[in-house]
Amino acid sequence: MSTDEGTARLGALVGELHRLLRRSATRRANRTVLPEAQVELLLLVRDHPGLSGREAARRLGTAPNTVSTLVHDLTAAGLLARERDPADRRVVRLHLTEAARTRMADHARHRTDLLTTALAALDPADRAAVRAAVPALDRLLATLRATD
């Protein structure tokens, strides 16, 4: 396998692993799967509480009206809270609700359980190789974030 093929395969594997874990963890938590765009916004707000809609659109690389629709849907679902900025009443600040925090914690717990079970099914050498790759994958993610 050439370097380009290996790199393409890495991307495909990471993407499929993400999708499979997301669907399986959501199913185990007995929840409906949220659209990826909604999940991205929730993760962004989790990492940046009080973020404005405009700033969320910039960070997600999408149009403000798209974020507005996402905020509307997530607010209606009880997962996001919107608060007016006291310094500028035109600006809305976004915060996770307790329901969102609970949902995200449940998802993380189920994802960890799924990975723990899957890793235990691997032979010891493969399990060790996957675990040994985690620091390098962290650095790869940091590199990709820095160029985003």
Image (spheres, rainbow, N blue to C red):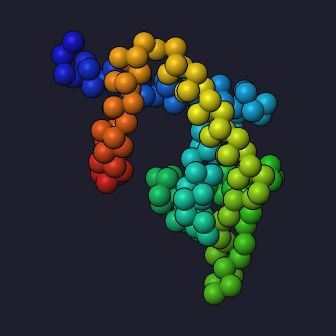
| Residue in view at x 60 percent, y 59 percent | 45
Quadrant for residue 23, please give it: top right
Residue 104 lies left or right of residue 124; in this view the side is: right
Which residue occupies the extreme left position in the image? 2
Which residue occupies the extreme front position in the image? 124
Image label count: 0
| Residue in view at x 33 percent, y 31 percent | 132
The answer to whether 30 is drawn above or below residue 5 in the figure is: below
Percent x, y for residue 123? 42, 12
Percent x, y for residue 1? 21, 12
The answer to whether 127 is drawn above or below residue 51 in the figure is: above
66, 10: nearer the viewer? 10
- Residue 113 seen in the figure: yes
The answer to whether 20 is drawn above or below residue 143 in the figure is: above
| Residue in view at x 26 percent, y 20 percent | 6
Percent x, y for residue 144? 33, 46
| Residue in view at x 33 percent, y 40 percent | 135
Residue 141 lies left or right of residue 83; in this view the side is: left
Residue 11 lies left or right of residue 35; in this view the side is: left
The answer to whether 11 is drawn above or below residue 66 in the figure is: above
Percent x, y for residue 143? 29, 48
- Residue 144 seen in the figure: no
Residue 55 lies left or right of residue 24; in this view the side is: left
5, 135: nearer the viewer? 135
